[in-house]
């Protein structure tokens, strides 16, 4: 059913395209929101993603990759959006910086995160963007490592490394008690 | 190793949009079965199998957190934003794409905006009589000269084909004279799927040597297969130069690529085969078919002097040679409304689909018109009143793509947005342009050239440009897209020489040429 709609959309059927975006909109919004942490920015990203996807859907060769393709466009759009907003935290190589994101609303009063144990979602928010994304796409959006690799445009090996690092970091974060430096 | 923390209900209120889900258990079961093995594999791979237990705790917590994330409501404005994005996309689709032509020749394909069929019943009758040529009616309905050439039996049916890779390329017919060659062709796709565009079109003489000084012009993207019969039918225009030697037999060599729109130059989509067809040329049927009118009259419009030198009429087109005084303060871009008119008021406009002219040198231009070769006009006049032009000193646009700013540029042009696409190593600059609705309603502007200069004075090429006859920006009515390479090898700011712009000089002129 969806496959036929995808084929129609690739061939230029506007209604089919709209139907597909509608079908995936909750997931897309969720990804955008978790990425950008702002309702306004997430909505903007969805709008831009719709535009970009519409303009390039005829390039999509394999209908089965539709969803991955769409998420990739969304993530690229969010990347651009974030650059525009100039709030992206630097990620220097494999060195992980334990920074609090400026937009994180889960910061404890006084800005200290070390005084109580973290909930898993709070712990997740402390991961650097790429690590967080890998976890979120895998656990919340049910993407396979292969799909995540396609979405983030990295080799599978890199995704696995990020995943492994994320597990280790999350484990440490969840353990935190009174030690601020981890 | 560490204390496991159960999902804590008390956090529910604190995370702004998450809530618990009733289907939690289902999720847990499905995902655990699916990934627990993977997890062991992963830990082995990183030689950290001893940490599996701890990591597995994280894994479980993540699975349990899923419903809280999944239940996040989306704002009701979501639909509105999707629609806005789609509307913008649909508008942008209505664009004219400009492809890079061979040097110094401008070819414009404006088919999309010519909807009324103007082919006379007589012409249609001729074409429908010849098997396989019926579709040509549509392809020439905006060119009076080609219509009258058909009416005067100047079209030569061919019907030669070559097939490779389940794609048949057929030349159905040609119209040829000393000025140009029009090839009507069919590409039949027997593969079922895909659309194809030319990757490369070559014309060779009997010796296998490429024809010299010709310009080949064809549609920039494959024509859509409107009726879904797997056939694309269109035409290739070949313009000869005064120095071109037309051979007795032409060989057309075509390479095709699969089209993914927006990626016309992707070399990987090229098909390996070459379609090769031989076209016999009976030169005695057209050699000498031309009429030359020496004009040599000048007009001065807002201080700019232009001289109409001569008009040469061939069956396929007319050519008007114009000379622009090098002392002019303005650069002349184009004539808005130049037409040839006969004593009865019948008009022949410029070529609107195909090669519209050429520039022999900086101050000279040859403009092509639809031909009146076969018509019996007693008198002919050259008339017009509006010319697009701009001060030679202001022909520069300097911009900084990083700062998203135009530093030096003409009025009425703004840079709206720069979209970076690092994965494809390019960035798209989106501009809005304000034009004159009187003349420009249906016109796209190719403001930018294909080359630009960086801050160090090195020259680079753009990837592509396109324009739309609409704009999202209030007060503006065109959108321009400019795609630049994004490999950091050039240094901002970058400078473009303006190629065309909606600024004008006006003054009526009416010159008799016959």
Image (cartoon, rainbow, N blue to C red):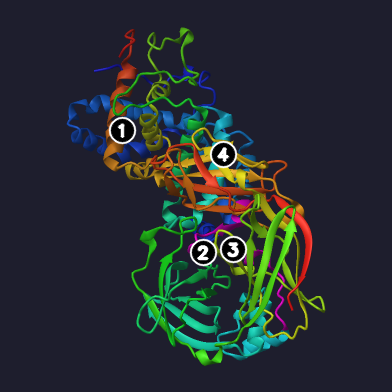
Disc on res. A163: 1
x, y (%) of residue B501? 65, 51
Instruction: Check disc 3 and report its element: helix, strand or loop.
Output: strand
**Which chain letter goes with mark 4?**
B
User: Label 3 belongs to which residue?
Assistant: B364
x, y (%) of residue A101? 44, 21
* Discs 2, 1: same chain: no
**Extreme residue in the right direction:** B344
Q: Is residue A21 left or right of residue B513?
A: left
**Which chain letter goes with mark 1?**
A
Label 4 neighbour load within 10 Å: few <14, some 14-19, many 20+: some
User: Label 2 belongs to which residue?
Assistant: B221
User: Label 4 belongs to which residue?
Assistant: B417
| Residue mark closest to the camera, 2 vs 3 | 3
Query: Label 4 vs label 3: CA separation?
Result: 37 Å
Q: Quadrant of residue B116?
A: bottom right
Viewer-closest of B331 and B413? B331
Viewer-closest of A79 and B63? A79
Label 2 neighbour load within 10 Å: few <14, some 14-19, many 20+: some
């Amino acid at each position: 059913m969806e496959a036929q709609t995808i084929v129609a959309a690739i061939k230029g059927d506007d209604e089919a395209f709209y139907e597909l975006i509608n079908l995936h909109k909750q997931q897309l919004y969720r990804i955008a929101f978790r990425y950008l942490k702002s309702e306004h920015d997430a909505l903007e990203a969805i709008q831009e993603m719709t535009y970009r996807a519409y303009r390039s859907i005829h390039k999509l060769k394999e209908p089965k990759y539709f969803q991955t393709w769409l998420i990739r466009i969304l993530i690229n759009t969010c990347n651009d959006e974030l650059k525009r907003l100039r709030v992206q935290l630097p990620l220097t190589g494999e060195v992980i910086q334990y920074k609090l994101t400026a937009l994180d609303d889960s910061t404890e009063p006084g800005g200290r995160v070390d005084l109580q144990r973290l909930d898993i979602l709070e712990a997740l928010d402390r991961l650097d963007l790429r690590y967080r994304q890998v976890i979120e796409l895998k656990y919340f959006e049910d993407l396979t490592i292969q799909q995540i690799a396609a979405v983030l445009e990295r080799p599978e090996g890199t995704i696995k490394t990020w995943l492994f690092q994320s597990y280790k970091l999350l484990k440490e974060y969840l353990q935190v008690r009174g030690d601020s430096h981890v | 190793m560490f204390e496991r923390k159960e999902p804590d209900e008390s956090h529910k209120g604190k995370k702004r949009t998450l809530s618990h889900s009733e289907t939690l258990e289902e999720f847990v079961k499905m995902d655990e079965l699916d990934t627990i093995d993977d997890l062991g594999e992963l830990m082995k791979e990183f030689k950290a199998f001893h940490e599996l237990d701890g990591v597995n705790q994280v894994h479980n917590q993540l699975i349990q957190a899923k419903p809280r994330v999944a239940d996040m409501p989306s704002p009701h404005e979501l639909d509105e934003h999707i629609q806005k994005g789609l509307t913008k996309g649909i508008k942008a689709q209505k664009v004219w794409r400009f492809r890079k032509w061979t040097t110094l020749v401008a070819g414009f394909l404006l088919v999309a905006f010519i909807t009324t069929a103007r082919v006379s019943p007589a012409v249609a009758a001729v074409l429908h009589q010849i098997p396989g040529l019926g579709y040509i009616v549509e392809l020439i309905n905006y060119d009076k000269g080609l219509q009258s050439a058909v009416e005067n039996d100047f079209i030569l049916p061919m019907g030669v084909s070559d097939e490779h890779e389940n794609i048949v390329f057929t030349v159905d017919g040609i119209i040829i004279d000393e000025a140009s060659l029009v090839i009507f062709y069919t590409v039949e796709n027997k593969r079922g799927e895909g659309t194809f565009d030319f990757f490369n079109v070559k014309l060779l003489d009997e010796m296998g040597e490429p024809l010299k000084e010709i310009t080949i012009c064809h549609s920039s993207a494959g024509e859509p297969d409107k009726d879904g019969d797997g056939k694309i039918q269109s035409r290739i225009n070949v313009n000869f130069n005064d120095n071109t030697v037309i051979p007795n037999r032409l060989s057309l060599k075509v390479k095709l690529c699969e089209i993914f729109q927006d990626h016309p130059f992707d070399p990987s989509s090229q098909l390996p085969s070459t379609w090769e067809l031989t076209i016999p040329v009976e030169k005695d049927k057209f050699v000498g078919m031309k009429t030359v009118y020496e004009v040599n009259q000048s007009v001065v419009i807002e201080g700019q002097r232009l001289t109409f030198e001569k008009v040469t009429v061939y069956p396929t087109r007319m050519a008007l040679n114009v000379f622009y005084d090098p002392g002019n303060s303005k650069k002349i871009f184009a004539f808005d409304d130049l037409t040839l008119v006969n004593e009865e008021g019948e008009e022949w406009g410029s070529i609107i689909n195909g090669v519209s002219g050429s520039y022999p040198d900086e101050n000279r231009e040859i403009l092509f018109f639809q031909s009146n070769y076969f018509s019996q006009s007693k008198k002919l006049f050259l008339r017009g009143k509006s010319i697009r032009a701009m001060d030679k000193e202001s022909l520069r646009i300097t911009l900084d793509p990083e700062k998203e700013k135009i530093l030096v540029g003409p009025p009425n042009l703004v840079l709206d947005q720069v979209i970076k696409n690092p994965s494809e190593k390019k960035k798209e600059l989106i501009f809005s342009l304000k034009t004159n609705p009187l003349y420009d309603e249906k016109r796209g502007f190719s403001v930018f050239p294909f080359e630009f200069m960086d801050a160090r004075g090195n020259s680079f090429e753009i990837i592509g440009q396109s324009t739309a006859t609409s704009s999202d920006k209030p007060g503006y009515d065109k959108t321009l897209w400019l795609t630049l390479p994004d490999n950091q090898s050039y240094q901002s700011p970058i400078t473009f020489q303006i190629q065309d712009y909606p600024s004008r000089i006006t003054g009526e002129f009416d010159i008799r040429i016959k």
